[in-house]
Amino acid sequence: MKRYKTLIIKALILSMTCMLVSCGSRDRNKEAAVKVYYPDSSYTTLLSREVKSVSGNTLDTVLGWLGSTGANGSVTVSDNVVIVDHSNDNGKVTISLDKAYKKLNPTEEVLTRAAIVETLTQFEDIISVRFMVDGAELTDSKNETIGEMTKDSFITSTGEELNFYARANVTLYFTDVDGTSLKRYDESMVYATNLSMEKFVLETLLKGPQAVGENNAYPTLPPDATLLNVTVKDRIAYANFDPAIREEPYKVSEEVALYSIVNTLAALPGVDQVQISVDGSTEGVFLDHMPLDALYERNDNIIE
């Protein structure tokens, strides 16, 4: 009887072990969202789109994402540039590009390089990225070798051309499918430091949630609207838009649209209140009843 019980226990242990191995195998192959970074059309910042990733993706797969066009027309590496070779030596990736890469203007080149590094270094097994162009090490404007780049290179590098860009944590407010409340999204983004942070966050807000890879969120503002200018004085942000800001292409309440602007700006240090104007005028209302000449503060009650 004792031997029989021992055999049962061993069988149970073996069965549980197989279950754990099976579960582990399923976990390893579980899909996860990965952000593919790309420069925006004006080459002032990096945006991102999400792709479904299965753990164990090869470097070929990831580089394929960088060269493919997203649903919104985004692409990291333009058709004019060819990745001719690549290698991964214990987490140190080398990307070899053809000579067409040298024809990119300085701004386009820096953001393209940043997008590649940001995308690749999301993966734990990739430590750094090094670039070769036409068989030689990539150099900066002073003809100095750039060398290995990590996720922090675009913050800490002292290279002259990299000082135009920095990484910042920003908070944006988009909406849900009903358009009746706001949802907070915290994003880490690379931006051009010659832009004010106020201008940067509002222009990103206008581009919509897909521009930052938030595919489950919905836009609050019309995509054709333009931010004319934004200034801050005495902790009040003055945001001036063109008349397209009053268009209503989405099913979004007036409060949600207005407070997506106000709450996004009020998340920045130094901003307590916001006034919105249209073509420089504060006469009338934003859409239906909310006056433009009022000063608006952060509204937590509308956040989901």
Image (tube, rainbow, N blue to C red):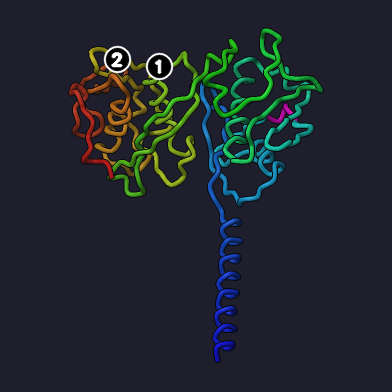
> Is the C-beta separation of discs 1 and 2 under 8 Å?
yes
The correct choice, above or below, for 163 with respect to 220 in the image is above
Residue shown at the point (81%, 23%) measured from the top left: 135
Q: Quadrant of the C terminus?
A: top left
Q: In which quarter of the image is the N terminus?
A: bottom right
| Earlier-in-chain disc, 1 versus 2 | 1
Q: Residue 196 carries which label?
A: 1
Q: Residue furthest right?
A: 135
- Considering depth in this image, is 256 or 140 the residue closer to the camera? 140
Q: Where is residue 71 in the image (x, y as percent from the top left)?
A: 57, 42
The correct choice, above or below, for 299 with respect to 284 in the image is below
Q: Distance between the residues labelled 1 and 2?
A: 10 Å
Q: Circle 1 sits in a helix, a strand or a loop, which is it?
A: loop
What are the residue bounds of the magenta stretch?
A: 78-82
Q: Which mark is residue 232?
A: 2
Residue shown at the point (59%, 83%) measured from the top left: 7
